[in-house]
């Protein structure tokens, strides 16, 4: 299980220190939520802040776009060298074109899916992405309660076995030590967690609990 702490829950007054602490604590990726105030009713951070995060982080960035104009934001953030850029299925008409643009910029493309959107709609795009991000909350705000999506994870796992066995499954929203065991059993590869890790205080302990290491 890879762990990607979400800096949406970090103390932005000490963001560089928070990112450095997460890296030292064993994070595999640093998850960056980008919201535009249109696709979701919230705004977060732009390229100036993400560039600073990229310069501070010793771990790859995992950028999650919750925006309407995916192409515009991809051009802004790809130069910072993230490992993944994910865009929402619901916000895009031309999924293949956007995935190919991300890959051509040297980044692994990922596609995100809201809790109410069926997994079956991804069937045609799965061969062209490296990761699927399943939302277990409605996107837009941190600290929300987990929506059980275990059936969707299992359904996606079966679909990937046929379409793209190397594609990872990431889950974001309300992930904690209370549900990580069942998420792992369902087939999740990457766990995004914000509130749980930052509430815990001991980042290393929280990350290792999510990874399945007894501490």
Image (spheres, rainbow, N blue to C red):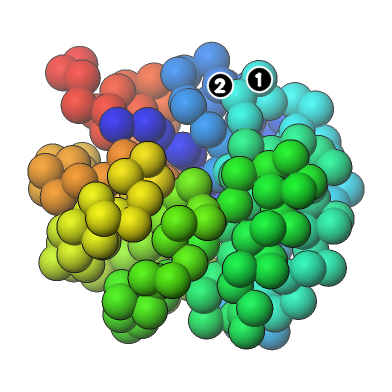
Q: Quick check: 134 above or below 170?
A: below
Report the front residue among 27 and 215.
Answer: 27
How far across and how far down the image is residue 190, in percent? 37, 41
Judged left or right of residue 45, residue 5 is left
How far across and how far down the image is residue 125, in percent? 48, 67
Judged left or right of residue 117, residue 128 is right
- What residue is drawn where x is 24% and y is 50%? 161
Q: Earlier in the sequence, mark 1 or mark 2?
A: 2
Q: Determine whether label 1 and label 2 are within 8 Å by CB.
A: yes
- What residue is drawn where x is 37% and y is 70%? 123
Report the front residue among 184 and 71.
Answer: 71
Report the front residue among 107 and 190.
Answer: 107
Q: Which residue is mark 1?
A: 58
How far across and how far down the image is residue 143, in percent? 41, 61
Q: Which residue is mark 2?
A: 23
Label 1 neighbourhood size at 10 Å, few (<14), some (14-19), many (20+)? some
Is residue 171 in view from this perspective? no
**Kind of element beneath mark 1:** loop
The circle on residue 7 is none
């Amino acid at each position: 299980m890879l762990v990607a702490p979400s800096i949406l829950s970090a103390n932005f007054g000490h963001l560089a220190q928070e990112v450095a602490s997460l890296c030292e604590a064993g994070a595999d990726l640093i998850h960056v939520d980008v919201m535009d105030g249109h696709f979701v009713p919230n705004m977060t951070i732009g390229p100036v802040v993400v560039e600073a995060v990229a310069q501070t982080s010793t771990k790859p960035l995992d950028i999650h776009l919750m925006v309407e104009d995916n192409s515009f934001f991809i051009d802004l953030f790809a130069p910072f060298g993230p490992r993944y850029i994910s865009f929402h299925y619901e916000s895009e008409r031309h999924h293949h074109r956007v995935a190919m643009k991300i890959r051509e910029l040297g980044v692994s493309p990922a596609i995100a899916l809201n809790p109410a959107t069926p997994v079956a709609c991804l069937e045609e795009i799965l061969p062209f992405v490296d990761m699927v991000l399943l939302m277990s909350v409605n996107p837009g705000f941190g600290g929300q309660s987990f929506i059980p999506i275990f059936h969707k994870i299992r359904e996606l796992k079966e679909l990937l076995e046929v379409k793209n066995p190397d594609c990872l499954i990431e889950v974001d929203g309300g992930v904690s030590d209370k549900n990580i065991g069942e998420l792992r059993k369902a087939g999740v590869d990457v766990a995004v967690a914000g509130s749980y890790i930052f509430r815990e205080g001991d980042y290393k302990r929280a990350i290792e609990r999510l990874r399945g290491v007894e501490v």
